[in-house]
Image (tube, rainbow, N blue to C red):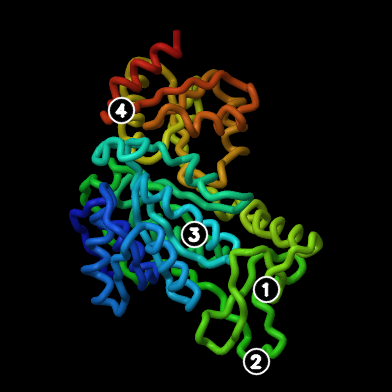
Amino acid sequence: MANKKRVLMQGNEACVEGAIAAGMRFYAGYPITPSTEIAEMSALKLPKVGGKFIQMEDEISGMAAVIGASAVGVKAMTATSGPGFSLKQENIGYAAIAELPCVIVDVQRSGPSTGLPTSPSQADVMQARWGTHGDHPIIAISPSSVEETYRLAIRCFNLAEKYMTPVIFLMDEIVGHMREGIELPDLSEIEVIDRRRPDPDDDDYKPYFVKEGEYVPVLSPFGEGKRYNITGLVHGESGFPSTKAEVAGPQCERLMKKIECNKDDIIEYEEKFLDDADIAIVCYGGTTRSVMRAITKAREKGVKVGMFRPITIWPFADEAVEKLAKKVKKIIVVEHNYGQLVYEVERAAKGACGVEHMGCVNGKVIMPDDVLKKIEEVRI
């Protein structure tokens, strides 16, 4: 019988527990509210499982250290919030083009700049997708509960290792500091994906060679017998830089396609009460609780409202939202910002229904009655 236990846990703690269950053995970062508990828990827990924790001098070096750990085959993570997330962006781009898997946790807070460090926010949604320069692939995942934080932390590492790419764990202050009773699964029940290793007898090994019809390279961890070059420059199969169009084009297209062509595996979302809904609320992360309570109240009044929650924020669930827009009369996007994911919803809806936005940027939590009021406004 599986050995499960129920514990009271904070979202930030669940992130660390899930990461370690997925095989995370290296953490480098710099403390910043409201993500600091992730660093604290990593410092406490990693040495007990043979892992390493290091506090770096700043956010830039924290990301660089994670890249270095990944290059030698270690599952690595860093965590931060708004200002630190900005500082990590250049190195996130390096991880993307060098195809070094890692997890970057962003426990979002109000901004810009130092902003409101302890207040809820979901204002880094677009930064998660477009923060680093140039065309690049990205996966970003957003949890809405402590238990889901544990599960999705594992999924972040699995996707990073499977597709050899950085993955953004887009938490927010509400979820990070929330405490809930959760059931931790037995480790034997958890699916853990590790990156592929090359054939040690392959004397013609090229780190960035990819077979026809495939998109993900097989990189040998440094120190395991294969010598090759890693660079942030555009490079060929050998890993060495190239400025030739016939090299740059296929490489850059392959980087994008390894995500685009695997959307069915990567994209995850949740739907509630949409079978008969006239109004759909799109929400994610910490806004979900208030939205669900508002939907319950609205349905008690006879208003047919449902919820669509993207769990994978990037790549965006375009097809699912387009299908939703053809079923309902209105979509309301509820998020703790001035308007970010609403633009993706509008794009995906393609004018099939009206799209309204409800945001909050004053540092307060969006309450169920606030959402209910918006539902009633839209209904008129």
- Residue position for label 1: 240
Secondary structure of residue under mark 1: loop
Q: Quadrant of the N terminus?
A: bottom left
Picture coordinates of residue 269, whole percent (x, y):
49, 43
Dot 2 crowding, Cα within 10 Å, few <14, some 14–19, many 20+: few
Between the residue at mark 4 and the residue at mark 1, the CA separation in whole angstroms equals 50 Å
Mark earlier in primary sequence (2, 3)? 3
- Which mark is on residue 339? none
Against 225, is 272 above or below? above
Q: Nearer the viewer, mark 4 or mark 1?
A: 1
First reached walking from the N terminus: tag 4 or tag 1: 1
Badge 4 local density, few (<14 within 10 Å), some, or many (20+)? many
**Disc 2 residue type (three-letter):** Asp
Compared across the picture, whether 240 is left or right of 287 comes to right
Instruction: Residue under label 3, please give it.
Output: 91
**Mark sitting earlier along the chain (1/3):** 3
Residue contact between numbered discs 2 and 1, judged by CB atoms under 8 Å? no
From mark 4 to mark 2, how far is it between C-alphas?
58 Å
> Residue 82 at what x, y percent from top left?
37, 45
Mark 2 lies on residue: 201
Amino acid type for the residue under numbered disc 4: Ile
Q: Identify the residue position indicated by label 4 in the image.
A: 366
Residue 304 position by quadrant: top left
